[in-house]
Amino acid sequence: MAADPIHQFEIKKIATLGEIGGVEIAFTNSAAFMIAAVIFTAGGLVLATAGRSLVPGRVQSVAEITYEFVADMVRSATGDEGMRKFFPLVFSLFSFILVLNMFGMIPGLFTVTSHIVITAVLALLVFFTVIGVGLYKHGFRFFRLFVPSGIPIVIMPLIVAIEVMSFLSRPISHSVRLFANMLAGHITLKVFASFIVMLGGLGAVGWAGAILPLGLTTALIALEFLVAFLQAYVFAILTCIYLNDALHPGH
Amino acid sequence: MADDRPPSDRRGSAAEDAALRARLRRLGEQIGALTPRPKADDGPSAQGRGDPSNLARALRLSSEFIAGILLGGFIGWLVDYFLGWSPWGLIVFLMLGFAAGTLNAMRSAGLIRPQDK
């Protein structure tokens, strides 16, 4: 049904790859779009920088601006050390999410980031990177992250428990934010767009009335483009802030 | 670009360039000193930027808060289920989660400094 706002998020099986423990492993439209995004990003960057002209052309400018943008973000949040170690990770995450979000804005295409499985795995990747790097670099001193200084010893256990909970809840909010924004945005868009068609069914008066949702839909599309970029940015900068904790726990 | 000019002119523009660059750097430093460092969990500083980013702010704060409670509830349920402390696991961890969610939201709103006291 075309008017069903949830229909656009349906996962469709393209081919079955095999079976693991009775669970079918299928190549889905989601996987196809992820591969497309990787090819688009990697291929686009390789092509854009192939010319290596001193005065960049249009495509090369885009690649350079993206690099500068992410590099500034990483450097300001994690310092030079973080820049050396984590730039590839943050850049990959940022461009992957941004391209997937933008793919989702093209009518008829699938929005991969509107599924919490995807965003949760990305957030957990960051989460475990933080723990791994923190433990590797600082050993047990990493756990000073949970012990704020200047707290009376009496309420210390309570504060530590709350800090641990706060730390553990990070991947949840990290992933839910991206997923919820994309899901809600696309549903809103679809609902308003279907109002146009519904009103149009009423005849001439309906068509006149449909101008309102048409205007709203246009405005929403602009807003959605902003959200698509902003959420990729927010995901990346949160990644930087969390990684900074791994490098400098407890300050 | 500059090569087709007479040499004296070029040297003059080079000196000018250096002066300009020094000024630019000084200005950059001043701006850097004045702009607040990005707060924890902050996207672009969302102050007074009209509807979209206020909405984003609202979503961000609520997601931080809800994440804490959800996690607390989940851990509490796990503890109850596997250790048989029912109902104390749920009670204790839900309240801890509530506190953590509040902490997250306040940190995200920039009301308390992130991590470092």
Image (tube, coloured by chain):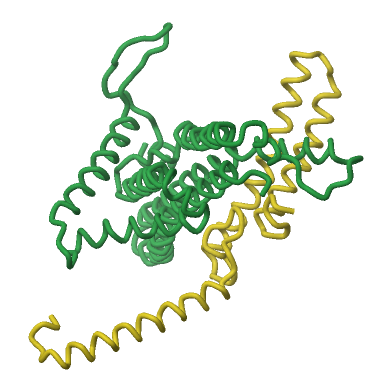
Chain colours: A green, B yellow
In the rendered structure, the answer to whether residue A239 lies left or right of residue A152 reads left
Please state the horizontal and vertical placement of residue A158, each as a whole percent of the image.
84, 38
- Residue A80, position as x, y percentages in the image: 46, 53
In the image: residue B94, left or right of residue A178: right
Residue B70 or residue A134, whichever sits in front: A134
Of residues A177 and A235, the one nearer the viewer is: A235
The residue at 52%/52% (across/down) is: A78
Q: Is residue A156 visible?
A: yes
Q: Taking A46 as reference, is A98 left or right?
A: right
> Residue sitting at 41 percent across and 42 percent down?
A89
- Residue B1 versus residue A155 in the image, above or below: below
Name, please, the residue furthest toward the left. B4
Residue B96: quadrant of the picture: top right
Residue B30, position in %: x, y? 52, 78
In the shown orientation, is residue A18 left or right of residue B2? right
Image position of A137 with respect to A44: above or below: above
Seen at 56% across and 73% down, the residue is B33
Q: How many marks?
A: 0
User: Where's the N terminus of chain A, which quadrant?
Assistant: top left
Eyeballing the image, is A222 above or below A247?
A: below
Q: Is residue A195 visible?
A: no
- The single residue placed furthest to the top in the displayed view is A21
Residue A86 placement: quadrant: top left
Percent x, y of residue A207 = 35, 62
